[in-house]
Amino acid sequence: MVIYVDVLFVVNFFITYLLLISTSFFAKSEIKQYRAVLASVLGGLYSLVIICDKLNFLLSLIGKIIISMLIVFVAFGFIRVWTYFKNFIIFYFSNVLFLGVISAICMFFSPKGMTVKNSNVYFDISASQLLVSAFCAYLVTYIIIKITNRTLAKGEIYSLSIFVDAKEYKLFAFADSGNKLREPFSDYPVIIVDKSKMPDKCERLIPCQTVSGQGVLKAFKPDKIIISSGKNKIEITKVYVALSDVDSKKFSAVLSNELINI
């Protein structure tokens, strides 16, 4: 079979992208689109190793693990050791499962134009078929993201202890996948807290999107925060608290899903 470099790259780019989205869903780890694209480009470039004899060492088990670790790092960054390790395990075994399914299809059905070599998948299809398949893959991924963003962490209420200047403030918090605020300099996630529950303290101004347009929220970095749910407790220091109005009788703060991802 003649292998076209552009088709090999694009096919494995989209496979890597879909596997990263799946990892984000199952690990409950937020993934930014630009990071997902960059990591998928890396996955596509890695597939080209099969046509370069001088890079064959990257096709070994150690080489595959190293590349997978790099892809996960590019996609999700490094927040905590356990979070990174969990993302890596889920991504790596998603790859193994996917390749197992594709290999089984090749073995039992022998579809024309489908090939698996050294963990890389190749489809011998025309440019028009490739574009249509890519569009369908993107459309399916987009729908999955929209659905999961609405259902992830639905109804989850956590106990929150915020320690500021030797004082502890206890309140309830809601885990919302829509809270994607980050402090722009440190890139730390942000917890939105009802301003009536906390002292009026401002160390940073964090840009945000409001109903009336762009706005800013007063924010500060607490000494630490403890998030509790049942017997599980998470202690966090790399986080900011933003003050705003939280219109709810059940909770006084809104968490990012990233903070409960342990």
Image (cartoon, rainbow, N blue to C red):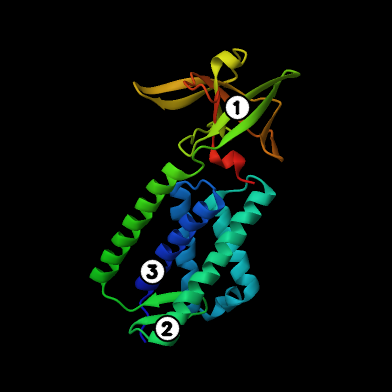
Q: Residue at x 45, y 76 (%)?
A: 102
Where, quadrant-wise, is the N terminus in this rendering?
Answer: bottom left
Q: Choose top left, top right, bottom left or bottom right for residue 185.
A: top right
Disc 1 residue crowd, few under 14, some 14–19, many 20+, Cα 10 Å? some
Is 231 left, or right, of 126 in this rendering? right
The CA distance from mark 3 to mark 2 is 16 Å
**Outermost residue, right side:** 166
Please tell me whether mark 1 or mark 2 is closer to you in this view.
1
Q: Residue at x 38, y 86 (%)?
A: 110
| Residue 58 on image: x %, y % | 59, 73
Amino acid bearing label 3? Val
| Residue 106 on image: x %, y % | 42, 83
- Secondary structure type for disc 1: strand
The answer to whether residue 51 shows anywhere in this view is no
Please tell me whether mark 3 or mark 1 is closer to you in this view.
1
Q: Earlier in the sequence, mark 3 or mark 2?
A: 3
Q: Residue at x 49, y 22 (%)?
A: 248
